[in-house]
């Protein structure tokens, strides 16, 4: 490996200010630093599709009047091409789109497991009682003549089967 070179600055060569360090040396700050959460194992490599996911999700709550927009949509799984009709709640307060865990299990749909769980928070910044996102689904969502490929986060949604956020 390259040894560390410390040479005095040269008025002629402007690149002498750059030092070459040996990558095999151990930085004492890194050795002494304690991990924030020792139980959380961070994988070295995430799949490309998982890198596009956000660090956290947010779900809003319905207002007291119950004014909401439910859309009749179809979702088709990308792995088995199964089609399922479902009512989707259009939720402009949700940062992503979600599908209910019980609906996924009932229909026997396949999911992808995430290497790291993603926390979910309500609109008031409290943690969502359904817990963290640990799996997602790759689907094609169809509404009337529009179709779009989406990655849905699998979570417990209660009365809703599908929430469409602004992703």
Image (tube, rainbow, N blue to C red):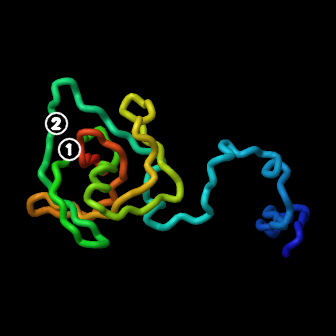
Residue 67: give x, y in percent of width and height: 15, 31
User: In the image, is 79 to the left or to the right of 143?
Assistant: right
Residue 165: give x, y in percent of width and height: 28, 46
The front one of 57 and 115 is 115
Q: Say which quadrant the N terminus sits in.
A: bottom right
**Structural crowding at the residue carrying mark 2, measured as other residues with C-alpha within 10 Å and reported as few (<14), some (14–19) or many (≥20):** few
Label count reads 2
- Pointer 1: what residue? 89
**Residue that sits furthest to the left in the current view:** 144
The front one of 70 and 10 is 70
The residue depicted at 22 percent of the width and 68 percent of the height is: 82
Task: Name which quarter of the figure residue 41 lies in.
Answer: bottom right
Q: Judging from the image, what secondary structure is the residue with disc 1 in?
A: strand
N-terminal of the two: label 1 or label 2? 2
User: In the image, is 106 to the left or to the right of 132?
Assistant: left
User: In the image, is 47 to the left or to the right of 140?
Assistant: right
Which numbered circle lies on residue 125? none
Tell whether label 2 touches label 1 (CB within 8 Å): yes
The residue depicted at 30 percent of the width and 62 percent of the height is: 109
The residue depicted at 90 percent of the width and 65 percent of the height is: 7
**Residue that sits furthest to the bottom in the current view:** 1
In this rendering, the answer to whether 86 lies above or below 49 is above
Task: Name which quarter of the figure residue 25 lies in.
Answer: bottom right
In this rendering, the answer to whether 165 lies above or below 62 is below
Marks 1 and 2, Cα distance to the nearest angstrom? 7 Å
Residue 6: give x, y in percent of width and height: 90, 63
In this rendering, the answer to whether 117 lies above or below 137 is above
**Residue that sits furthest to the top in the current view:** 64
Q: Judging from the image, what secondary structure is the residue with disc 2 in?
A: loop
- Pointer 2: what residue? 68
């Amino acid at each position: 490996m390259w040894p560390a070179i410390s040479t005095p600055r040269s008025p002629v060569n402007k690149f002498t200010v750059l030092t070459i360090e040996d990558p095999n040396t151990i930085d004492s700050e890194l050795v002494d630093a304690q991990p924030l959460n020792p139980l959380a194992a961070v994988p070295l490599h995430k799949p490309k599709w998982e890198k596009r996911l956000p660090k956290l999700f947010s779900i809003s709550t319905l207002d007291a009047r119950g004014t909401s927009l439910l859309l009749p949509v179809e979702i088709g799984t990308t792995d088995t091409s199964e089609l399922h009709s479902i009512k989707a709640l259009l939720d402009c307060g949700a940062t992503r789109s979600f599908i209910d865990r019980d609906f996924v299990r009932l229909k026997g749909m396949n999911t992808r497991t995430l290497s790291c769980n993603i926390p979910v928070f309500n609109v008031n910044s409290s943690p969502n009682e359904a817990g963290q996102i640990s799996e997602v689904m790759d689907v094609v969502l169809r509404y009337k003549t529009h179709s779009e490929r989406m990655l849905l986060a699998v979570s417990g949604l209660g009365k809703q089967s599908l929430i469409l956020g602004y992703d």
